[in-house]
Amino acid sequence: DGSVPPPTARPQVALEHFAYFPGTALPAAAWSFVPSPFDDYRVLVLLATIGCFFAVLLFDAPLPWRLAVGAAVAASPLLVRGAWFGTADATGILALLLAFGLLARSRYAWAAVALAAAILLKQFALVAVPFFAVMLLARGLPRPVLVRSAVAFVAVLAAGFLPFLVADAGALWRDTISYGADTYRILGYGLSAL
């Protein structure tokens, strides 16, 4: 709630460092204008979790397969648990699914926008960039389409990072890259052990 908690034996490092890219802070700020009680960020995470089902429907596959995979993703115990406890992974996963689903539907610029949004929301989406690029290049698209997609991608990343770079580029680097990649203790499930 923004107040400083009482001191504990184990300090909460997240009060001093925000070890994620700024994409989580931006929708959280916008979401705070939603009327109460729906202004809780967990509502957005819940909607993103449900949205993952619909994002899977964008892929090119037989409808029964898309329905089954969409249900498996949206009902995944990890995403459902995250929606309840406010873990913001669902927003990044939704953007990542949208990126590849839109790419499959030949909506290249929108796919690039979704991929940039996924990166802004969670650093793990950086892993998808080479796969996305290979899929784009494998389609043998004309150069203007590739350039338009690249410009859309860079524009969204720049719009997300620019306010934070202007405010304090050093703090952005220290919190997200230096601190986030070096000493931030990740507790949870999934790939945290890596």
Image: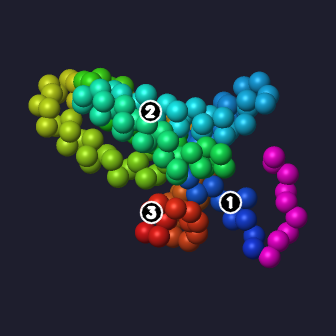
- Quarter of the figure with residue 73: top left
Segment tinted magenta in the rendering: 1-9
Task: Single out the mark in the foreground, 2 or 3.
Answer: 2
Q: Is residue 130 above or below residue 33?
A: below
Instruction: Estimate the x, y position of residue 5 in percent, counting from the top left.
Output: 85, 60
Badge 1 element: helix
Q: Residue 120 carries which label?
A: none
Mark 2 or 3, nearer chain start: 2
Badge 3 element: loop
Residue 139 within the segment the image draws in magenta:
no
Q: Name the residue under label 3.
A: 191
Which residue is rendered at x = 72% and y = 25% of the image?
34
| Any part of residue 35 in sight | yes
Which residue is rendered at x = 30% and y = 30% of the image?
64
Task: Tell me which colouring the rendered structure shows.
Answer: rainbow
Which residue is rendered at x = 81% and y = 46% of the image?
1
